[in-house]
Image (cartoon, rainbow, N blue to C red):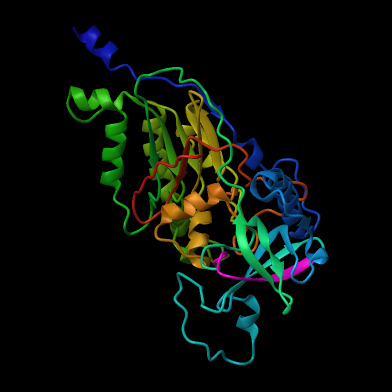
Amino acid sequence: MEVDSQEQLQRKQSTYLSLDENFEIQKEVYRGQQYSQIYFARLHMMRTLLYSLVPNWKSHLPVCTVLELEEGKECIIVGTLYKHMKLKPCILDEYSKERSVAPLIKPHNFMHQDDYLVLEDESGRVKLGGTKLSPSVYVTGVVVALHGKETSAGAFFVEDVLEAGLPPQIERPLKSREDKYVVFVSGLSIGSSSSNPLQFQLLVDHITGHLGDEEEQGFAAEIVHLVIVGNSVEISHGLLNGQNLASKDQSRLSEPFKELDILLTQIAASLPLDIMPGSSDPANFALPQQPLNRCLFPGSATYNTFRSCTNPHCFELDSIRFLGTSGQNIDDLTKYSEAKDKLDFLERTLRWRHLAPTAPNTLGCYPFTDRDPFLIDSCPDVYFVGNQEKYETRLLKGC
């Protein structure tokens, strides 16, 4: 009887494939290059795509550059949007001798009714008008095609907008019809005052099958993967002041990692797990964040089920593609645009085919020279973002 019970509770397995190579910074060499090159790479890739969509959209209209615009002539222009924002923070303001008399700004959003959009390509830039293109929806860095005409004031009156749309999704037959589950966890913030070790230990016990009756343990056995989506630890800023730390402070600095490693070791002994860096974790600030150093996890890193991954993170389980971030891209969109909820922001990034359109304008990223790793060329089956205020889901269907 015991043997039969053990066979019934055998944990299900899945085939794992990492697709993080695009986000890894290995052969890149920083030679003082500026960020213009990543914008050029983005515009080149997206413009080629939009050009291929124009014949099915407005085949009777010519495609022009900004420099070729003529007053009153209808045409299509393709370029990168730039949003002029009155309240956008500027580092120079901190050094201004004159104190600002502007009203206090809400720290979570910098939108203003006077904001406007500009379209830019290699030949020039033009201010955009009309009601078809709302400044509250779009952000700097999005590449679009616009139908309209130049006005006597030198602006471009927009009559219609073409976005890249949802990227194509690879159709794959499901290898297995049995239920399998992936667990996503974010914002553990071990080391913070709000962290509760008991809650995390209960989660670990549930995932590893040490809690509940046979039914709950049977459900736990169907969990095939765990993804920790950033902000796993929180270190007091007082310890990170650039000064040499006393032995007491060194212990306080390493304690959150020791606690996290103990818990991850229990999980890694039971099932595969991926850990992604977040904004509060000891990783590089700019996206794409590189994997957390394995030396931080001396216990769990000894298991081949433990993987330290990039942020953004892309992988496949049984040919189901997952793509996600630790939340910095969506948090930045909430500061410089508006939506009904966070899921709208996620949907926009898919329709714009870009994970982080505000990078590098307001979101830090590495100055790539010949590519933009945040372009989405294939639509994932599951798109996830961590460290948000609440749990929400949406099923998005393409044409």
Q: Is residue 56 above or below residue 189?
A: above
Residue 125 located within the stretch drawn in magenta: yes
Q: Is residue 158 visible?
A: yes
The one of 111 and 23 positioned closer to us in this rendering = 111
Name the image quarter holding the N terminus: top left
Left or right of 390, for residue 44 = right
Left or right of 21, for residue 369 = right
Residue plotted at (72% across, 51% down):
60
The magenta span reads 124-134
Q: Is residue 281 visible?
A: no
The quarter of the displayed image where residue 223 is located: top left
The quarter of the displayed image where residue 291 is located: top right
Residue plotted at (49% across, 20% down):
173
The one of 136 and 334 positioned closer to us in this rendering = 136
Residue plotted at (63% across, 42% down):
23
In percent of width and height, residue 11 lies at: 34, 20
Q: Is residue 259 above or below residue 364?
A: above
Residue plotted at (69% across, 59% down):
80
In percent of width and height, residue 154 lies at: 74, 76
Q: Is residue 95 above or below residue 206?
A: below
Residue 228 located within the stretch drawn in magenta: no
Considering every residue shown, the one lying at the far front of the view is 60
Q: Is residue 61 above or below residue 52?
A: below
In percent of width and height, residue 245 lies at: 52, 61
The one of 170 and 188 positioned closer to us in this rendering = 170
The quarter of the displayed image where residue 218 is located: top left
In percent of width and height, residue 54 lies at: 69, 48
Left or right of 304, for residue 82 = right
